[in-house]
């Protein structure tokens, strides 16, 4: 969520901490701050509000509440009752909710004789800071309140609404043209993308006597949109079922700032506050001498009840493992606007309506812990359990098989479960090449062999040897060994360097033989040889069914003295060159390599001695030949041919300067 620093400051009389400090405070106690940047006279935060806190924190007011609780700084409200417009007489507004489950609350209000124009500079600036395009005073006011307190709002041109407003399911075949989305193309050309929908009959709509005027909780309709010629308004502040909004917006592939908040579930109690604040803005920005605000029409069949939680402060000590004074617990809860009524052995807590995430004791303890400070909690060793854990058969034998492959020089790979083709299609794929569940591991292994074979020189490998254990998904009507969901094992080998008597198929056969010795049964299957190498795959669940359940776990003995060094990987391509050198007998290849490394510098990232032989010359003298493969790569750029040629010239020149040495 994008958050304005100046917007936050407007809630406090005192100067709030610097953007750097706020980022640190939030990251340590509430939200991860992805970044912050200066934007004009403001700072813009990109705060990651996760679904567990989205019910109250997808708005500036929610973020303000957290900042207030963390810093113990009181909040000043932006509006109060004296700002509310005076109520006058307007035509009756009739509202009917046919589906109370999908629409728990709907508040409407008529406003007559308004003047719709351009918003004031400060309002435009705040909206544009968080990436919102200013449209007009009505739309901008609705957007401001939504981003301020988290309740979506909408306004209809009342003169275009015919009859009563009904919240109902659409009739099959009904159509609506939704508000157009404006897109700016290259060259600054503005295009409007039409949104014409034909309903299936399970979509919730806001309708008048003529038909749908809005897709509930997602987007308004073009027929009743507010423009600068609008004189009379019907305001909407409603609450819609979160599951419904998520399903419909996903199916229609239609997301909006409103749907994002509804699908994360917000309290119906917020609707009235939003309507009041919306009215205050309209009274300020759109008022004329004849403007009249009507009474709120609030259809609220089953009002939400404020949540109560019985809490014993000793539960915090039991769960967290540390003792926090009761006074500090009360202080933390009070800063979070949680009402505390102390009793003899416990507290009665009254949870704010918007905190739908606070349900059980553990939720309260989590709030206490994060504001008290996780850094104050010392690590404590757990007591040893008297119960002996059961051993998962598939996990045990998978680990045994993996250890065997690794001991043979294989590397484990974890490839994508979602692929371009398969038997089971994803309803809403994130990409066209990830639209199906995989039916085998072999296809991924082949691609992996092909890719890594091209990089064998860089990796310093003569052969690419990989394996994967993972789930695959086939149709249930396939042969038993390929039907349904099951664990599969795939092995792949590509013999990059030709070695007499060594083939990728032979390497796989040897690896399979070693696994058979480890698990004690034969593995039946066919090795497939392709241009990129050899691949072997079997249904591992069938293998597991033939193995005994283990009685204990064998602990792998890893040498403790071995030092593991991690290095950053370059994002730029490598280049390979070969150099062969004649040297007098007695000169070692290491001495030649020392000169090569010195002249190659930091761009020479790998060297491999791949050939040696002794040559007898016509005069009877002998010389040793050493051939090296050199891999060059930069951490900062793609090396040009000139870069590499320059390095090779330096290496050649230095070698030729040595007595009786010669680059051949």
Image (spheres, rainbow, N blue to C red):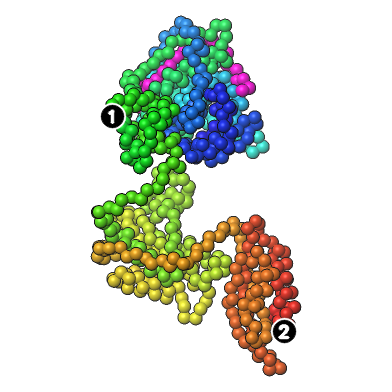
Distance, label 1 to label 2, CA atoms, is 94 Å
Residue 205 is at least partly visible in this image:
no
Is 447 inside the magenta-drawn segment? Answer: no
User: Which range of residues does the magenta coloring cover?
Assistant: 97-122
Closer to us: 270 or 542: 270
* Image-quadrant location for residue 600: bottom right
* Image-quadrant location for residue 540: bottom left
Closer to us: 547 or 556: 556
Q: Where is residue 638 drawn, in percent x and y? A: 65, 58
* Image-quadrant location for residue 621: bottom right
Kindly identify the residue that appears in the image at 67 percent across and 37 percent down.
187
Closer to us: 189 or 259: 259
Kindly identify the residue that appears in the image at 48 percent across and 40 percent down.
28
Q: Where is residue 370 drawn, in percent x and y? A: 43, 37
Q: Where is residue 590 drawn, in percent x and y? A: 62, 77
Tell me if 35 is positioned left or right of 263 in this view: right
Q: Secondary structure at mark 2?
A: loop
Closer to us: 14 or 83: 14
Kindly identify the residue that appears in the image at 38 percent across and 33 percent down.
325
Q: Secondary structure at mark 1?
A: loop
Which of the labelled discs sits on residue 85, or is there none? none
Q: Where is residue 602 drawn, in percent x and y? A: 65, 64
Residue tagged by mark 1?
345
Is 120 inside the magenta-drawn segment? Answer: yes
Kindly identify the residue that appears in the image at 62 percent across and 20 percent down.
120
Tell me if 649 is positioned left or right of 198 in this view: right
Q: Residues within 10 Å of mark 2 (few under 14, many from 20)?
A: few
**Quadrant of the image for the C terminus?**
bottom right
How many numbered badges does the structure rendering display? Answer: 2
Residue tagged by mark 2?
660
Q: Residues within 10 Å of mark 1 (few under 14, many from 20)?
A: few
The relative height of residue 176 versus residue 547 in the rendered view (above or below) is above
């Amino acid at each position: 969520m994008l958050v304005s620093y100046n917007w936050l400051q407007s809630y406090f009389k005192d100067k709030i901490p610097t953007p750097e400090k706020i980022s640190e405070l939030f990251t340590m106690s509430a939200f991860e701050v992805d970044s912050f940047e200066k934007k004009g006279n403001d700072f813009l935060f990109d705060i990651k509000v996760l679904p567990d806190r989205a019910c109250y924190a997808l708005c500036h007011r929610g973020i303000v509440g957290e900042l207030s609780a963390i810093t113990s700084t009181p909040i000043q409200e932006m509006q109060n009752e004296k700002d509310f417009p005076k109520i006058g007489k307007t035509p009756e507004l009739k509202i009917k909710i046919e589906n109370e489950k999908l629409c728990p609350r709907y508040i409407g209000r008529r406003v007559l004789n308004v003047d719709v124009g351009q918003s004031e500079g400060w309002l435009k600036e705040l909206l544009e800071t968080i990436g919102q395009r200013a449209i007009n005073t009505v739309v901008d006011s609705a957007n401001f309140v939504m981003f301020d307190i988290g309740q979506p709002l909408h306004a209809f041109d009342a003169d275009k609404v015919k009859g009563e407003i009904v919240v109902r399911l659409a009739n099959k075949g009904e159509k609506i043209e939704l508000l157009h989305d404006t897109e700016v193309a290259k060259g600054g050309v503005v295009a409007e993308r039409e949104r014409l929908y034909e309903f299936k009959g399970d979509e919730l709509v806001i309708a008048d006597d003529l038909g749908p005027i809005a897709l509930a909780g997602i987007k308004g309709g073009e027929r009743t949109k507010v423009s600068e010629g609008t004189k009379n308004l019907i305001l909407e502040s409603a609450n819609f079922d979160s599951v419904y909004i998520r399903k419909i917006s996903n199916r229609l592939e239609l997301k909006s700032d409103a749907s994002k908040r509804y699908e994360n579930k917000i309290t119906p109690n917020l609707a009235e506050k939003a309507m009041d604040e919306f009215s205050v803005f309209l009274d300020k920005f759109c008022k004329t001498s004849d403007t009249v605000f009507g009474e709120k029409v609030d259809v609220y069949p089953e009002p939400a009840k404020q949540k109560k939680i019985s809490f014993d402060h000793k539960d915090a000590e039991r769960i967290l493992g540390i003792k926090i004074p009761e006074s500090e617990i009360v202080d933390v809860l009070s800063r979070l606007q949680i009402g505390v009524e102390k009793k003899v052995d416990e507290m009665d807590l009254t949870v704010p309506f918007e905190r739908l995430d606070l349900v059980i004791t553990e939720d309260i303890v989590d709030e206490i812990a994060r504001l008290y400070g996780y850094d104050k909690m010392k690590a404590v060793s757990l007591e040893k359990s008297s119960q002996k854990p059961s051993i998962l058969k598939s996990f045990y034998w998978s680990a045994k098989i993996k250890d065997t492959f690794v001991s043979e020089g294989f590397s484990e790979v974890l490839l994508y479960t979602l692929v371009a083709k398969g038997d089971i299609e994803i309803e809403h794929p994130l990409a066209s090449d990830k639209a199906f569940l995989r039916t085998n591991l072999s296809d991924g292994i082949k691609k992996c062999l092909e890719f890594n074979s091209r990089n064998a020189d860089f990796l310093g490998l003569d052969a690419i040897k990989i394996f994967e254990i993972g789930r695959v998904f086939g149709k249930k009507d396939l042969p038993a060994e390929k039907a349904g969901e099951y664990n599969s094992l795939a092995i792949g080998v590509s013999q990059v360097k030709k070695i007499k008597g060594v083939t990728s198929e032979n390497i796989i056969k040897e690896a399979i033989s070693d696994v058979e010795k480890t698990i004690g049964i034969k593995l039946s299957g066919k090795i497939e040889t392709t241009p990129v190498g050899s691949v072997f795959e079997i249904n591992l669940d069938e293998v597991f069914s033939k193995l005994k359940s283990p009685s204990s776990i064998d602990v792998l003995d890893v040498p403790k003295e071995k030092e593991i060094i991690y290095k950053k990987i370059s994002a730029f391509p490598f280049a390979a060159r070969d150099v062969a050198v004649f040297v007098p007998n007695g000169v070692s290849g290491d001495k030649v390599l020392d000169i090569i490394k010195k002249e190659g510098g930091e761009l020479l990232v790998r060297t491999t001695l791949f050939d040696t032989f002794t040559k007898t010359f016509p005069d009877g003298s002998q010389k040793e030949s050493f051939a090296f493969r050199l891999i060059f790569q930069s951490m900062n750029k793609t090396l040009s041919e000139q870069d590499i040629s320059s390095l090779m010239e330096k290496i050649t020149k230095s070698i030729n300067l040595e007595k009786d040495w010669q680059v051949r």
